């Protein structure tokens, strides 16, 4: 049933948001050039790698030595807007359609974090990762890593259709109100370094 909802939901949302995605793609192409999409390998269900897609929010500016600048310095005005309203994540609907993501589940993190997880934290990969999740509606980037993992594991232990619908409804409200998107100016969390 969960896969059926993901397939139906992502299909409807892709059709509904396709004009907006086209406009965003044009704006990114004009303001930042190519590529329009950012892709990165992330661990999926049972830690199987897949490519996650987002709209590009950063430029490729480098310092005098040719080294690329930190993300906070490369985030563009367009990128800030896209992240503020989570519009940069719309291409992930295609990940859901393809079965790599679910609409609801623990957010897929970086591959390099896998060796750093405790046995309990690694249980977050027992379910398919999602575009939104229990941790996202309970703080998102404004909570610490330990709390985020506890919320992810709580979801793994308590997942249900009703809970997924609740998370989706609250996510819409959180995005509209911009609650918990970030406690930091550059709209991203510090890197996880293990316990």
Image (cartoon, grey):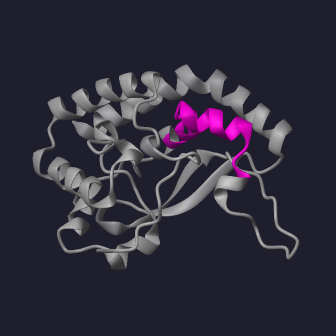
Residue at x 46% of width, y 44% of height: 183
Q: How many numbered circles does the render carry?
A: 0
Answer above or below: position of 68 versus 73: below
Where in the figure is residue 3, as x and y percent of width and height?
A: 29, 40
Residue 192 vs residue 161, the one in the foreground: 192
Answer above or below: position of 151 versus 170: below
Answer above or below: position of 185 versus 26: below
Q: Which residues are magenta?
A: 74-92
The quadrant of the rendering that contains the N terminus is top left
The quadrant of the rendering that contains the C terminus is bottom left
Residue at x 30% of width, y 32% of height: 5
Secondary structure of the magenta portion, mostly?
Answer: helix
Residue at x 72% of width, y 37% of height: 77
Q: Is residue 102 visible?
A: no
Where in the figure is residue 55, as x and y percent of width and height?
A: 64, 43
Where in the figure is residue 113, as x and y percent of width and height?
A: 40, 71
Determine if the magenta segment contains residue 139.
no
Name the residue at the left extreme. 158
Name the residue at the front extreme. 184
Instruction: Left or right? Give the position of 11 relative to 26.
Output: left
Answer above or below: position of 93 versus 41: above
Determine if the magenta segment contains residue 77.
yes
Where in the figure is residue 194, as x and y percent of width and height?
A: 34, 74
Name the residue at the right extreme. 64
Instruction: Left or right? Give the position of 189 relative to 30.
Output: left
Q: Is residue 183 visible?
A: yes
Residue at x 81% of width, y 59% of height: 61
């Amino acid at each position: 049933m969960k896969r059926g909802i993901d397939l139906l939901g992502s299909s409807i949302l892709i059709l509904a948001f396709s004009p907006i995605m086209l406009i965003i793609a044009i704006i990114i192409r004009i303001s930042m050039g190519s590529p329009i999409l950012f892709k990165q390998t992330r661990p999926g269900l049972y830690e199987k790698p897949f490519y996650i897609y987002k709209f590009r929010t950063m430029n490729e500016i480098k310092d005098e030595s040719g080294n690329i600048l930190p993300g906070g310095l490369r985030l563009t005005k367009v990128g800030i807007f896209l992240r503020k309203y989570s519009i940069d994540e719309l291409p992930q609907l295609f990940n859901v359609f393809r079965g790599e993501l679910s609409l609801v589940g623990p957010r897929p993190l970086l591959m390099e974090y896998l060796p750093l997880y405790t046995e309990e934290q690694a249980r977050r990969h027992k379910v398919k990762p999602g575009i939104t999740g229990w941790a996202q509606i309970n703080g998102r980037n404004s909570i610490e890593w330990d709390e985020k993992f506890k919320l992810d594991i709580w979801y793994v232990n308590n997942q249900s259709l009703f809970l997924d619908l609740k998370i989706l409804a609250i996510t819409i409200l959180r995005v509209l109100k911009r609650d918990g998107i970030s406690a930091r100016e550059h709209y991203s969390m510090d890197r996880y370094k293990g316990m």
